[in-house]
Amino acid sequence: LGSGNMLPVRRALHALNPAEIASLLASLPPTERNLVWEMVSPEDDGEVLLHLPESIRTGLIRQMDTAELIKAAEELEIDDLADLLEGLPETVTREVLRALDADDRARLEQVLAYEPDTAGGLMNTDTVTVRPDVSLDVVQRYLRLRGEVPTHTDALYVVDRYGAYLGALPLDKILTRAADDLVANVMERETPAIPAGEKEHDVARRFESADLVSAPVVDGKGILVGRITVDDVVDVIRAEGEHNMMSMAGLAEDEDLFAPVRQAALRRGIWLGINLMTAFAAAWVVGRFEATIGEVVALAVLMPVVASMGGIGGSQTLTLMIRSLALGQAGVGNTRLLLRKELSVAAVNGLLWSIVVGAIAAWWFSSLWLALVIALALVVNQVIAAASGVLIPLILKRMGVDPALAGSVVLTTVTDVVGFFALLGLGTVILL
Amino acid sequence: LGSGNMLPVRRALHALNPAEIASLLASLPPTERNLVWEMVSPEDDGEVLLHLPESIRTGLIRQMDTAELIKAAEELEIDDLADLLEGLPETVTREVLRALDADDRARLEQVLAYEPDTAGGLMNTDTVTVRPDVSLDVVQRYLRLRGEVPTHTDALYVVDRYGAYLGALPLDKILTRAADDLVANVMERETPAIPAGEKEHDVARRFESADLVSAPVVDGKGILVGRITVDDVVDVIRAEGEHNMMSMAGLAEDEDLFAPVRQAALRRGIWLGINLMTAFAAAWVVGRFEATIGEVVALAVLMPVVASMGGIGGSQTLTLMIRSLALGQAGVGNTRLLLRKELSVAAVNGLLWSIVVGAIAAWWFSSLWLALVIALALVVNQVIAAASGVLIPLILKRMGVDPALAGSVVLTTVTDVVGFFALLGLGTVILL
């Protein structure tokens, strides 16, 4: 790419699918990214944009003129187009809407009317519907006439004449059942319809637990409004998995590997600033014991040990809790039991490692009293860390704050403050 | 549950699907879990076991007698059964194999022959195949005769008379194309077959990037051996998402919320022990400067600030790298560019926050020299932390060590050691 010879790049791009091109773009710094982006063929533009995280997408869209954007938009399915439009300035959105035919516009507006993180925002409106009172033979002839069905159609949906959802008619049923069977006798009534307002997290859990490929979406009156296909759900699951991990480090889940330095520095700088407050809280506690440290410098030497052991122990409990909360397996119902278990684990490990740490301290500083101080501080901090790991995410969740985002800062503050207070406080009482 | 009245529990269980029952079991402590498990109806046993993480599954299986296990096994699909058998003692596996009919046994043995984390281990053998030289009409009559197809069949596979894979025949093509069209003219030749030895991680990326619902699996000679469906891929994606997050805290990705205390304490204790070594490395550095701390106790007070800011900054880079490595977007090719970007971000934030921290230190301890020391130490530590965040995961990966598991320990060691060394070293030079 550096050599300025673009022909091999162009050729290589042709061999990649949109998702692979998106992954390539994400791995490039801005200048090279823009160069490669201009070489992507226009009919792939829309799909590639969709596969990119929003942070990168916005940057590329800013370079495109409206005509290119409309061209890219035309190649997309309605649900994907809706996703794309959410990131665009309103003037462009209006122009794209105007460029669509009336049918598509109406369908797009329907999807845009729902929140993007709900079943309605996730759905596509390209359902193929049949009536319950026709035979499979008629359905088959209708499909032959139609010539094709939308991608990922694994079932037709059966609706009454008002459009109310009655059941699903899987394609394999049409193929395997007798031709004169009525749709009403063959359709699966137990396939549940998803309310359009359901959160995408719950939609994903539903797909996972029932192994669905697609599912019908209905409005408040039971009218079929669209369907959700598993490929969109896979994206939700992937994003959820990354959300927790990235949030715990104060990063956006779609953080661009090559975000402009100013943008990246700003976003992470805020996180560092928040953490600075917790660090100074810990420093303040240490400051209360300046006199003690001046007399027993060994306490300062052992400070990192108590703080880091508490941080690690607490993080383990916290991470387990955040995962379990996301899966709906931890909650108010089993808090007491969880607390008992985590406290037991912390007590066992606290006692075990306090013996080891105490022994090392006794040998290093030739002081049994010092060994006693650090051993006690370690046990206290492990136990408090475990309790915090269970309770902090539950409290944050009740306050409507994402435990994955705020949990680790709050926890670290607690373990640092408690650790230093225990070590230096006990040191003051026992050693001075 | 506590009241001993089991009827309402039994009724509630009947309303849940196997995945929901599994989630319920995972949220219960061992005693209650065993009680509820006994109430699950035997025909659901297999499915429920499959939806449980291995750590819990093994415990429940230990309670079942062989007859129950065989009954549970019989209800499962071949690929799921293979997953289940991997956790069972060999005597039971042999008995289950004996209980199957010859056909199923042969198919099961075929799946078991592949590593569980490959396409072969993930696949199901229930493909429906057709020949290329018949008409769609013949296919349709064959399907009617068959009466049903395996779940998640969205395509039949076209093979030659040796069983070699030729292409896919999606069900909707059979329904929408003319009845006298030949399979050879309708089938999709571009649907790629997955080699049985391909790693499940790559299989998942393939499904995600091409939005697949199912895909054919072939052996080394191109013979069709099975198919992978999206529901199994969803499990892989979910597990991968959790793996990174859980590993970074030293937890197993399927850590049981209510693992027995002894087991949980042991596994986490090992992690605490590993971290203890890094904590003592940091303590050792501090110990080298005992004399300095004795004279300028304020340095001990500020130690937590430098260490925690370095840890946070480094974690942000590390987390971004671990995610990007998993997605294949970071690697040797763009290391230098990544390093430059992360170092720039760290330098900007290091300078910015060093001014804030320096100002606070100057005010707190009324010493401009001390402010200079902590400001310099902070910048040095931020920059080294960013470099470590980029390089440590790359080096670990090259060494064949999972960056998500070992990355944070190594990083914390570096940021603690460098942070304390910079602060106390500069303090010794400048302040004494």
Image (cartoon, coloured by chain):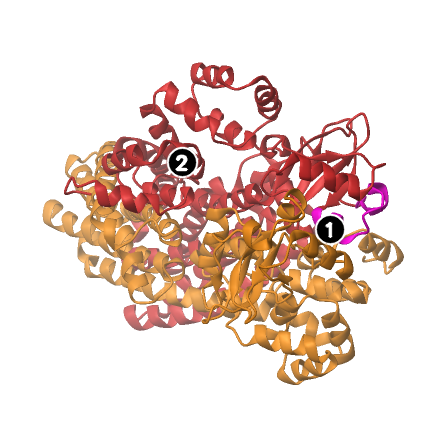
Chain colours: A red, B orange
Give whichever of discs 1 and 2 has the lower sequence position.
Answer: 2
Secondary structure under tag 2 reads helix
Residue type at mark 1 is Leu
- The residue that label 1 is drawn on is A175
- The residue that label 2 is drawn on is A44
Q: Give percent across and percent down for residue A61.
A: 37, 26
Residue type at mark 2 is Asp
Q: Which residue lies furthest to the front in this view?
A: B180
CB contact under 8 Å: marks 1 and 2: no
Residue B244 is drawn in which quadrant?
A: bottom left
**Both marks 1 and 2 on one chain:** yes
Secondary structure under tag 1 reads helix
Q: Give percent across and percent down for residue B338.
A: 25, 45
Q: Which chain carries label 1?
A: A
Disc 2 crowd rating (10 Å Cα; few below 14, some 14-19, many 20+) is: some
* Residue drawn at point x = 39 percent, y = 54 percent: B326
In front of the other: A17 or B379: A17
Q: Which chain carries label 2?
A: A
